[in-house]
Image: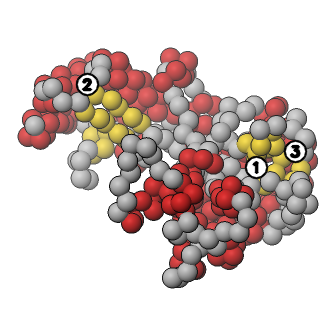
């Protein structure tokens, strides 16, 4: 089967090689350059090639089922960041593969939120594929269970059909006083990007604890470095869409209040950025900043996870509600700076009763 799959790829690659500039063969595998393909009158050739590839792959799989996962689309498709139309084409292709292959092949495309947002704001036929788009998010329970399952894996514990005892598994590596729920919520409240964050924070705390069980004091001791890492990771997650976003957040939010209204957030974008010459000069060369109003800058802070808002069901961030409008954000009475960033930014903490 492996040989048949390899042959299917080679046939399609040979066809695409006849389109000058369509494929970059100087790297392992093949990087499709959608810009060249879309600029040429090669749409029919591309469609025939994709159809042929699907036929050959299905034949090679025989009765087996297959999966295609594309991660970090901006690395696989150079130039996709500059033209969101390319992303729209890739999403449509993934959707078509899933439709036409039935249950034989499932294709999954993972993109960063910043890239999705750029596409959403520059869409052409977004409505044709929005039904195929989902947003990944991790709630508190899922994050706590993830750590429990990692403990199972580390200690060679077999998970039976009855599931796992999360509290018991945590007690193998962690120690807490009082309520388990309160302790785990203290851990997960510092997570911006879901599973990656809880794993990183727990690993840092484990290194601090050494041979001892991990306690809240070990987690607290790591929060300064963790906050610094999270701030500069914004460039990795959103820098393609918002270059130097980490530096912007650092300049504008240093020493800010933890809690604010939507109106106050927009005003802060004006007083601390647009109307502050040193900041304005530093970032005015960047398109996302130069073309933005203070209201738009406020919305970007929500999009990248720096700002969240309070709701009757608890704190909400963009990872949970990515479609919040600018008007709705600015109408909120209770916004807050995400706890993950506060230590590095020297955020002025709210009272314990109000703090998120």
Residue at left offset 35%, top offset 23% = 98
Marks 1 & 2, CB-CB < 8 Å contact: no
Other-residue count near label 2 (Cα within 10 Å), few / some / many at <14 / 14–19 / ≥20: some
Q: Nearer the viewer, mark 1 or mark 2?
A: 2
Q: In the rendered structure, find residue 93 and report the number of the disc placed on it.
A: none
Other-residue count near label 3 (Cα within 10 Å), few / some / many at <14 / 14–19 / ≥20: some
Q: Is residue 110 visible?
A: yes
Foreground pick, 13 / 312:
312
Residue at left offset 80%, top offset 60% = 252
Q: Under tag 2, what secondary structure?
A: loop
Mark 2 highlights which residue? 104
Other-residue count near label 1 (Cα within 10 Å), few / some / many at <14 / 14–19 / ≥20: many
| Vertical side of 56 occupied by 82: above or below | below
Q: Residue 297, located in which quarter of the rendered image?
A: top right
Across and down, in percent, residue 85 comes to 49, 29
Tell me how far mark 3 sits from mark 2, CA to CA: 48 Å
Tell me how far mark 3 sits from mark 1, CA to CA: 10 Å
Residue at left offset 89%, top offset 50% = 260
Q: Under tag 3, what secondary structure?
A: loop
Mark 1 highlights which residue? 307
Foreground pick, 307 / 148:
148
Residue at left offset 71%, top offset 69% = 177
Tell me how far mark 1 sits from mark 2, CA to CA: 42 Å
Across and down, in percent, residue 295 comes to 82, 40
Mark 3 highlights which residue? 334
N-term-proximal mark, 1 vs 2: 2
Across and down, in percent, residue 101 comes to 28, 20
| Vertical side of 288 occupied by 92: above or below | above
- Compared across the picture, whether 67 is left or right of 233 comes to left
């Amino acid at each position: 089967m492996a040989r048949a799959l390899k042959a299917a790829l080679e046939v399609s690659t040979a066809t695409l090689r006849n389109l000058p500039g369509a494929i970059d063969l100087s790297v392992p595998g093949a990087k499709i350059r959608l810009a060249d393909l879309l600029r040429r009158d090669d749409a029919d050739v591309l469609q025939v090639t994709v159809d042929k590839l699907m036929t050959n792959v299905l034949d090679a799989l025989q009765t087996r089922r297959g999966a295609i996962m594309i991660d970090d689309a901006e690395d696989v498709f150079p130039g996709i960041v500059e033209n969101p139309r390319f992303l729209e084409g890739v999403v449509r292709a993934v959707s078509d593969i899933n439709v036409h292959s039935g249950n034989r092949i499932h294709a999954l495309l993972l993109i960063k939120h910043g890239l999705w947002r750029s596409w959403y704001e520059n869409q052409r036929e977004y409505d044709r594929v929005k039904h195929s788009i989902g947003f990944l998010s991790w709630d508190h329970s899922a994050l706590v269970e993830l750590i429990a399952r990692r403990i199972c894996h580390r200690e060679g514990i077999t998970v039976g059909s009855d599931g796992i005892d999360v509290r018991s598994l945590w007690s193998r590596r962690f120690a807490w006083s009082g309520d388990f729920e309160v302790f785990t919520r203290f851990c997960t409240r510092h997570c911006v990007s879901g599973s990656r964050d809880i794993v990183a924070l727990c690993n840092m705390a484990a290194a601090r604890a050494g041979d001892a069980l991990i306690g809240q004091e070990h987690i607290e001791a790591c929060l300064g470095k963790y906050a610094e890492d999270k701030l500069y990771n914004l460039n990795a997650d959103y820098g393609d869409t918002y270059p130097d976003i980490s530096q912007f957040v650092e300049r504008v939010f240093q020493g800010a209040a933890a809690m604010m209204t939507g109106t106050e957030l927009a005003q802060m974008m004006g007083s601390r950025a647009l109307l502050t010459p040193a900041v304005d000069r530093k970032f005015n060369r960047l398109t996302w900043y130069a073309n933005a109003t203070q209201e738009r800058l406020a919305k970007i802070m929500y999009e990248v996870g720096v700002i969240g808002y309070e709701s009757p069901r608890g704190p909400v961030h963009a990872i949970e509600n990515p479609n919040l409008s600018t008007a709705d954000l600015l109408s909120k009475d209770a916004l807050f700076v995400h706890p993950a960033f506060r230590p590095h930014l020297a955020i002025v903490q709210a009272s314990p009763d109000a703090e998120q």
